[in-house]
Image: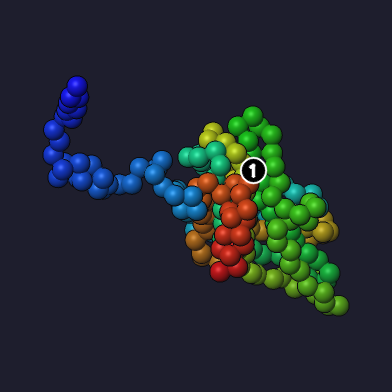
Amino acid sequence: MTVRITKPEFNLRDKLSELEFFKLPYHKIPDGSVCQRKFYYLPNSGGAENETTSTSFVDASYFMHYFTPRFIDSVIMIEFTVQIKRTRNDSRYNYHRIQRVNPDGTTVNLDYDNNGLSFNGAIESNGSSTTTYAHLFLREIDTPYTTDRIQYKLQHKVNNSDTTIRLGENGQNRRLNCTIIEIKGLAGLERGRLWLEFLMHY
């Protein structure tokens, strides 16, 4: 008995054209690829400043941004760039960290033992009236395991309430910005950990 199999005709050129993406679909992006990058630019620092004398971490107004991951297993890299001012230098220090706010309102502190991601200060015997200006750059990675909208915000504190720390010093006309980057498919994977260690150092 002879069995005949027939297949529908197709145009090879059309099939090849289907594989040429003007824009690569997100589900075809390989793990380890940047699949989303958001830039947030604040007004010149004179219009977006926040200061505190608190010895506990408090929110820095204006330095709060929303982000919606595309994949649940992504790693999120957050970067903040800002000018800062501290009013004293006699063994006075300031600390900064990033905090994630989940869709249900719970928070996750992206720091180390409540000591922040950034620490700077000075020890001077006659520095009580010395004002310090500096540039702050913070970078941290996060694995929120969600595709719901989340918020990342900057927090700061000082070690002594007689000192004021200001983010976005109004005497420094610089752009304040934040970049949030989503890297697909690296959360919880060993190859993701090694890749991120390389990225954080270079």
The C terminus lies in quadrant: bottom right
Looking at the image, residue 128 lies above or below residue 147: below
The residue at the point 33 percent across, 46 percent down is 24
Who is closer to the viewer here, 17 or 107?
Answer: 17
* Residue 69 visible in the current orientation: yes
> Image check: 89 left or right of 142?
right
Residue furthest to the top in view is 1
- CA neighbours of label 1 inside 10 A, class few (<14), some (14 to 19), many (20+): many
Q: Tell me if 123 is positioned left or right of 95 in this view.
A: right
For residue 99, side relative to residue 11 (left or right)? right
Locate residue 86, reporting x and y percent. 71, 65
- Residue closer to the observer: 95 or 47: 95
- Indicate the position of residue 12 as horizontal and vertical percent values: 15, 43
Q: Amino acid at mark 1?
A: Arg
Identify the residue at the far right of this view: 125
Q: Nearer the viewer, residue 56 or 186?
A: 186
Q: Kindly identify which residue carries mark 1.
A: 100
Q: Which residue corresponds to the image point at 20% horizontal and 41% vertical from the top-left? A: 15
> Residue furthest toward the bottom?
125
Residue 159 placed where, x, y %?
A: 82, 59
Horizontal relation, residue 103 to residue 52: left or right: left
- Above or below, 105 relative to 32: above
